[in-house]
Amino acid sequence: MAHQATSDRKTLIGNLGANALLTQTAGGKTVVEFPVAVTEGSERVWYRVVAWGQLGEQYARGLRKGDFVKVRGRYHEEHWRDAQGQLRLTRKVTVTFVQRLRAKAAMPAPEPTYGRLMLAWLHEEEIPLPIPA
């Protein structure tokens, strides 16, 4: 079970770690997700970026892995336990704005990936947290 802690607005500037994944909820709503890596001090921090509806579809068509982007939206954290019982953290930003600052290369953007599969990047850099006593 995930515990969510909601925070304020956040602006990220970083690189897309994968092409956008476009899916639909059981209720038929379109959702697009993609990872963004941000350098914070000497660390690389991963955020899971989520966009809904037509806004998400637009981003799925125009962004690809490696693009340097500016993302603005509502930030929140999800704390959860993995199969081994370790407490983990997922950082999410539900976007209101994304701007591509620089494309990775001068080649056409791929079509968005459709499907219900979650990308491996969602948990590649999971952060183990101390288990409260």
Image (cartoon, helix red, strand yellow):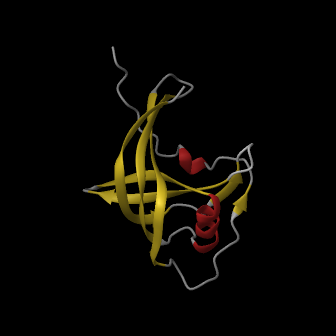
The residue shown at (49%, 72%) is: 67
Q: Give residue 4's position: percent from left, percent from top.
A: 45, 34
For this orientation, the residue located farthest to the top is 133
Is 66 located above or below residue 90 in the figure? below
Is 74 located above or below residue 17 in the figure? above
Relative side of 54 to 82, left or right: right
Q: Nearer the viewer, residue 67 or 11?
A: 11
The residue shown at (35%, 55%) is: 10
Relative side of 109 to 8, left or right: right
Is 12 located above or below residue 64 in the figure? above
Q: Give residue 119's position: percent from left, percent from top.
A: 62, 50
Residue 131 occupies quadrant? top left
Q: Give residue 102's position: percent from left, percent from top.
A: 45, 79
Q: Nearer the viewer, residue 57 or 2?
A: 57
The residue shown at (40%, 39%) is: 6
Quarter of the image that includes the C terminus: top left
Counting the numbered discs, the total is: 0
